[in-house]
Image (cartoon, rainbow, N blue to C red):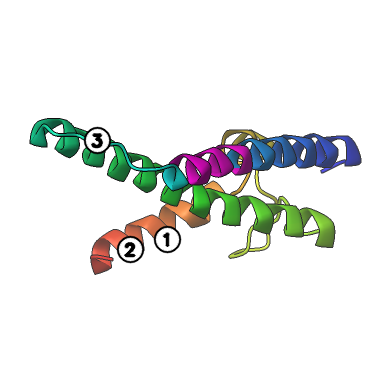
Amino acid sequence: MDKEQIEYFRTYLVTQLDELLHQADGTVSGMTEPKENFPDPTDRASHESNRNFELRIRDREHKLIKKIKQALDRIDNGTFGVCDSCGEDIAVERLKARPVTAQCIECKTKSEKMEKALGI
């Protein structure tokens, strides 16, 4: 992979990381505001359901943030775009679709089949 492609992915990942961190800050500030008083139990249940849904989304985003940081570390140490399992180059098309990936499509497919067979 050439330097131009690496810089493209670095820029993309940093932008995505900044957006996710900004959203997380908004969630934290929204959660620390005083609780609203809902006299109707249905309204209160709906509010709690929405809040739990938002927290699940933020948890998934937190996991994505960790993966983005790992991808940026791989860019810094020169291993971005190289499969962790087989050591072959990961196709640029795969990296464009999933820039945080650490495995080529063949190794990831094998890994997923193994997980499914083991029931993981």
Image point (28%, 66%), residue name: 120
Location of residue 18 by image quarter: top right
Counting the numbered discs, the total is: 3
Can you name the residue that lies furthest to the left here? 41
Viewer-proximal residue, 88 or 119? 119
User: Magenta residues?
Assistant: 21-30
- Looking at the rendered structure, the kind of residue marked 2 is Glu
Q: 17 or 34: nearer the eye?
A: 34
Find residue 27 and report its horizontal and vertical position in percent: 48, 41
Mark 3 crowdedness (10 Å alpha carbons): few <14, some 14-19, many ≥20: some
Name the residue at 64% across, 58% down: 83
Determine if the magenta segment contains residue 66.
no
Q: Where is residue 71 in the image (x, y as percent from the top left)?
A: 68, 53
> Residue beneath label 1, please?
111
Quadrant containing the N terminus in the rendered view? top right
The disc labelled 3 sits on which kind of residue?
His
